[in-house]
Image (cartoon, grey):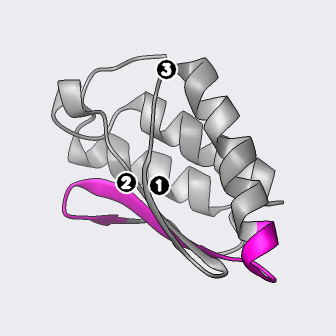
Amino acid sequence: MSRTKLTEQEIQSSLDALNASAASPWKVIEGKLHKEFQFKDFNEAFGFMARAALVAESMDHHPEWFNVYRTVRVDLATHDAGGITELDFSLAGRMETIAG
């Protein structure tokens, strides 16, 4: 998986593909892929974070995220590349699968 910063056109194309199968849209905010996941309750939100953490660790790519009760806010960017890469879209896709 490439850790090379994507162009604006590549980001938009990848964003369109990701959102085609997402329950709610991902956006680019302040140079990062952004989404807020909503779950039934805290237990479900925390379970999502635990499963996503295992995937992120296996990819050696770690999200910026924040949890309050049933909401998990996620921001993805590849810091050493200075922006959004294929790796961010890959992790976003895996998170979509986990959130199911």
- Callouts 2 and 1 close, C-beta under 8 Å: yes
Q: Position of residue 99 (x, y in %)?
A: 77, 59
In which quadrant will I find the C terminus? bottom right
Q: Residue at x 67, y 44 (%)?
A: 52
In three-dimensional space, the C-alpha distance between marks 3 and 2, rounded to whole angstroms, equals: 24 Å
Is residue 41 one of those drawn in magenta?
Answer: yes
Is residue 30 one of those drawn in magenta?
Answer: yes
Q: Residue at x 81, y 69 (%)?
A: 44
Q: Which residue is mark 2?
A: 12
Q: Residues within 10 Å of mark 2 (few under 14, many from 20)?
A: some
In three-dimensional space, the C-alpha distance between marks 1 and 3, rounded to whole angstroms, equals: 22 Å
- Quarter of the rendering containing residue 23: bottom right
- Quarter of the rendering containing residue 30: bottom left
Q: Amino acid at mark 1?
A: Leu
Q: Position of residue 61 (x, y in %)?
A: 46, 28
Magenta extent: 28-44
